[in-house]
Amino acid sequence: MKVFIKHALAAVVFASAFGAQAQTAASAAASPGTDGEVRKIDKDQGKLTLKHGPIANLDMPGMTMVFKVADPKMLDTVKEGDKVKFSADRVNGAITITAIQPAK
């Protein structure tokens, strides 16, 4: 019985942590916050090159780099030279743009 309770408690803790992580990722995706400029679009590879400011959630300084995009349709919403606001996170080990919109 004690073993069952320990496993049940572990499952609840894991589910709570996973839910919080998913909620954090969802809220980050809903509100893009990093400034960037589109340098290159590679639709064949599903990648976007951005010159960007610091990305706080990834503890990353500003630089120019290539990102995967979570949804290839995002690439249809931007063109080279566009100023954008975006969110990025680690998805399956790759730094990935999870949301992007034109800067205001």
Image (cartoon, rainbow, N blue to C red):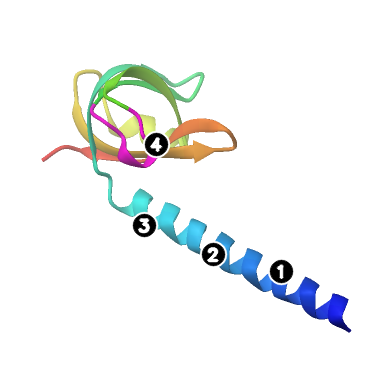
Between circles 2 and 1, the one closer to the viewer is 1
- How much space separates mark 3 and mark 4, taking CA atoms? 15 Å
Residue designated by label 3: 27
- How much space separates mark 2 and mark 1, taking CA atoms? 14 Å
102 horizontally vs 15: left or right: left
- Proximity of marks 1 and 4: CB atoms separated by less than 8 Å: no
Element on which disc 1 rests: helix
| Amino acid on which the number 2 mark rests in the picture | Gly
Q: Is residue 101 above or below residue 3?
A: above
Q: Earlier in the sequence, mark 2 or mark 3?
A: 2
Crowding at mark 2 (Cα within 10 Å: few <14, some 14-19, many 20+): few
- How much space separates mark 4 and mark 2, taking CA atoms? 20 Å
Element on which disc 3 rests: helix
46 horizontally vs 7: left or right: left
- Proximity of marks 2 and 1: CB atoms separated by less than 8 Å: no
Residue designated by label 2: 19
Q: Which contiguous range is marked in magenta?
A: 53-60
Q: Does the magenta stretch include residue 54?
A: yes
Quarter of the N terminus within the rendering? bottom right
Residue designated by label 1: 10
